[in-house]
Image: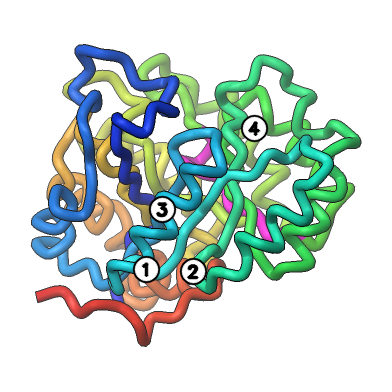
Amino acid sequence: MNIDAHVHYWQLARGDYDWLTPGSPLYRDFGPTDAAPCLDAAGIDGVVLVQAAATHAETEFLLAHADADPRILGVVGWLDMMADDAPARLATLAGHRKLRAIRPMWQDIADDDWLLHPKQTRAYEAIIDHSLAFDALARLRHLPNLLRLIDRHPALPIVIDHAAKPDIAGGGLASWRDLLRPLAAIPHVHCKLSGLLTEAAPGATLETILPYAETVFDLFGPDRLIFGSDWPVLTLRRDYATWWRWAHDLTRPLGPAAQSAIFGANAARFYHLDPLHAQSAS
């Protein structure tokens, strides 16, 4: 089974996508009818929708899509981690079987210590109690504090989105690798093979991405890597078919068993997905 574990849908009229700017190619609605041709062509059986706005309404919007589309196996939603009622609100959201993880938008928060604020302790504990996972939308500057967070909450299942967004355009391989290595040494920390193209300069080639992909292969191994497209953000650099093909080319040296894990089995295991409800791609 092929699973894309990082897809976004948004609807501008909802009014909570503060990071989208008029004039950008991304400044329009993206939904299932837009994604379907890409997913069908790649033979994607299931997807995980990931939040793109810091509101509870966004999570409800994605869960509504999940109710309507059997190909959506899971949703990574948003939670106000600082709210006094965060555990109660999460308990309500967790009543939906397709809510599989929570993701604060760390990359947009100026305070690098925000993720360690004591007010969030009960929210992290609630995520664990509801058997949910945690998507870490982290940049390099967050990684030392992510280590501290794991020390505080060692039972929190974590996947690092977009391999922590290395500065591929600026040639930041060594500093990124050094910061990522101690996290990769923790057995329950996973990493998404996603978002790398967006961090590269326009016109980047497969060879540009190769040393970064090889680094995550070496650090995390095939059992803790999860494929994601980051569609439609991906389209700022390449189309879906290109990243799908490149991801397979990059992982081919690992062998077919590893590819099967990276392109489906690892996502199903990490997020506790139910592939039996997936829509078979035609």
Q: Helix or strand or loop: what does disc 3 sit on?
A: helix
Residue 178 disc label: 4
Gap between marks 3 and 2, in whole Å?
10 Å
Gap between marks 1 and 2, in whole Å?
8 Å
Q: Dividing the picture into quarters, in which one does residue 200 lie?
A: top left
Give the residue number, with chain letter if any, for mark 2: 98
Q: Helix or strand or loop: what does disc 1 sit on?
A: helix
Give the residue number, with chain letter if any, for mark 3: 62
Q: Where does the magenta region start and end?
A: 156-164
Gap between marks 3 and 4, in whole Å?
35 Å
Q: Between disc 3 and disc 4, whose residue precedes?
A: 3
* 258 vs 237, nearest the viewer: 237
Mark 3 belongs to which amino acid? Leu
| Residue 65 in picture, x, y percent from top left | 34, 59
Q: Nearer the viewer, mark 3 or mark 4?
A: 3
Gap between marks 2 and 4, in whole Å?
35 Å
Residue 281 disc label: none
Check residue 159 for magenta coloring.
yes
The residue that appears at 61% across and 70% down in the rendered structure is 95
The residue that appears at 55% across and 26% down in the rendered structure is 174
Q: Is residue 53 above or below residue 20?
A: below
For disc 1, the neighbor class at 10 Å (few under 14, some 14 to 19, many from 20) is: some
Q: Between disc 1 and disc 3, whose residue precedes?
A: 3
* 19 vs 227, nearest the viewer: 19
Q: Nearer the viewer, mark 2 or mark 4?
A: 2
Q: Helix or strand or loop: what does disc 4 sit on?
A: helix
Q: Nearer the viewer, mark 1 or mark 4?
A: 1
Cβ–Cβ under 8 Å for marks 1 and 2? yes
For residue 136, side relative to residue 154 (left or right): left
Q: Between disc 3 and disc 2, whose residue precedes?
A: 3
